[in-house]
Image: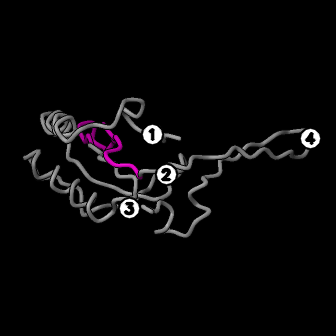
Amino acid sequence: MRITQGTFSYLPDFTDEEITAQINYALSNEWPLSVEFTDDPHPRNTYWEMWGLPMFDLKDPAGVLLEVNACRSANPNSYIRLNAYDASLGRQTTALSFIVNRPAEEPGFRLDRAERANRQIGYTTHSYATERPEGDRYRSD
């Protein structure tokens, strides 16, 4: 199952050249970028681990791609996303966010149904990846 989160999630994975084009777009709009990674891509898990600090003063797309590739090398079996922030409205908002790396195997999710009081039905999303311990969720074997 392919995880679809963020901009461009229904497109095929971007090449480094296509990622650089998006970095150029963000930098031309004066949006600083940051790199994040996780091994739990649950839709409600919005806070991923940060790779370094946001790159507020970086204006060179090659420097941003260097950080993306360093994160890929250190976390090859994790989801990695690139975020661009827009502070033009006086608050920090995410203007662009997309996945730049995925594990080779994406086990997906299960929808659990639960009956509640007064004949109400509730649903919960369960990630199959979380059945393995953290750091071992996406093996390369």
- Which residues, given as a range, are shown in magenta? 85-103
**As displayed, is residue 38 above or below residue 10?**
below
Q: Which of pointers 3 and 1 lies earlier in the amino acid sequence?
A: 1
Q: In the depicted view, which residue is nearer to us: 125 or 84?
A: 125
**Labels 4 and 3: the sequence-earlier one:** 3
Which residue has dot 4 on it?
Answer: 118
Q: Secondary structure at mark 1?
A: loop
Within 10 Å of disc 2 (Cα), the crowding (few <14, some 14-19, many 20+) is many
Q: Is residue 29 left or right of residue 114?
A: left
Q: Which residue is mark 1?
A: 5
Q: Which residue is mark 2?
A: 41
Position above or below: 80 against 28 = below
Magenta-span inclusion, residue 81: no
Label 2 element class? loop
Contact? badges 2 and 1 (CB < 8 Å) = yes
Label 3 amino acid? Glu
Front residue of 86 and 89: 86
Name the kind of residue labelled 4 in the image.
Answer: Asn
The mark nearer the N terminus, 2 or 1, is 1
Asked where in the image residue 17 lies, by quadrant, the reply is: top left
Residue 91, image x, y percentages? 31, 44
Relative side of 60 to 107, left or right: left
Q: How far apart in space, not on screen, are marks 3 and 1 (Cα)?
A: 16 Å
Do the residues under discs 2 and 4 have CB atoms within 8 angstroms? no
Element carrying mark 3: strand
Residue type at tag 1: Gln
Give me the C-alpha separation between circle 2 and circle 1.
9 Å
Tell me: 74 left or right of 47. left
Q: Which residue is mark 3?
A: 49
Residue that extends furthest to the right in the rendered view of this protein: 118
In the rendering, at what x and y percent does residue 57 appear?
A: 11, 53
